[in-house]
Image: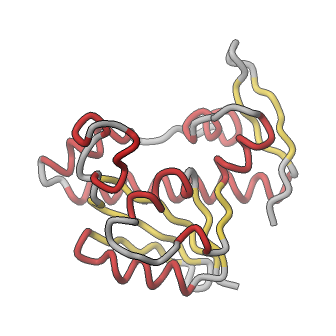
């Protein structure tokens, strides 16, 4: 079984492209995958997007955070493939369907794993503009690693934690296999 954990960062921010309805215009700066078949991370830049898409299509399953409403939407600028048809486990979508509201990866990782993201999307855009590709790839790789750890925690324990409005950890049951 080859599960591919996946995340991408963009060249532009929402305000650069007129809002969330123009995700295709954000453009890929970098993407990172982790393959359970090879136990390796792999980084891609915009010029490598066709290889990224091929790797995603070859996976038995793609796992990520907000894939359907962000990453796959950004990739639509590069392919006519229906990436939403791939066997995908979108952790954010799963949690939203259970909770009725969105919870960020950083909040989930903080209370479930005791770790925090190393940066955010706006800083990633700035690093791209400054040509700091190594920092950008490291940040994206960190997000993939956190997503993988969150998935594994949920798979192994049957729940993950999220902070309620008062910041108190709350359990939500998950059935990730």
Q: Work out which quarter of the rendered image holds the N terminus and state it.
A: bottom right
Q: Position of residue 177 (x, y in %)?
A: 81, 67
Q: Position of residue 81 (x, y in %)?
A: 47, 78
- Residue at 76% of width from left, 36% of height from top? 161
Q: Is residue 149 left or right of residue 10?
A: right
Q: Nearer the viewer, residue 177 or 11?
A: 11
Q: Nearer the viewer, residue 40 or 97?
A: 97
Quarter of the image for residue 148 reads bottom right
- Residue at 57% of width from left, 52% of height from top? 65
Q: Is residue 175 left or right of residue 17?
A: right
Above or below residue 20? Residue 143 is below
Q: Position of residue 18 (x, y in %)?
A: 27, 37
Q: Nearer the viewer, residue 108 or 101?
A: 101
Q: Is residue 140 left or right of residue 149?
A: left
- Residue at 65% of width from left, 67% of height from top? 88
Quarter of the image for residue 104 reads top right
Going by the picture, which residue comes out furthest to the top?
166
Q: Position of residue 113 (x, y in %)?
A: 67, 42
Above or below residue 21? Residue 81 is below
């Amino acid at each position: 079984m080859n599960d591919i954990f996946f995340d991408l960062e963009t060249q532009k921010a929402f305000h650069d492209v007129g809002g969330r309805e123009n995700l295709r215009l954000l453009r890929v700066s970098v993407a990172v995958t982790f393959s359970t078949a090879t136990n390796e991370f792999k980084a891609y830049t915009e010029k490598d997007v066709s290889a990224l898409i091929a790797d995603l299509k070859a996976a038995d399953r793609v796992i990520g955070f907000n894939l359907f409403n962000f990453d796959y939407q950004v990739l639509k600028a590069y392919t006519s493939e229906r990436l939403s048809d791939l066997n995908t486990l979108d952790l954010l979508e799963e949690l939203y369907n259970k909770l009725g509201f969105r919870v960020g990866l950083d909040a989930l990782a903080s209370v479930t794993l005791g770790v925090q993201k190393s940066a955010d999307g706006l800083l990633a855009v700035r690093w791209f503009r400054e040509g700091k590709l190594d920092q950008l790839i490291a940040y994206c790789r960190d997000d993939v690693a956190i997503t993988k750890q969150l998935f594994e925690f949920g798979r192994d324990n049957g729940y993950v934690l999220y902070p309620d409005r008062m910041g108190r950890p709350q359990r939500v049951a998950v059935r990730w296999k």
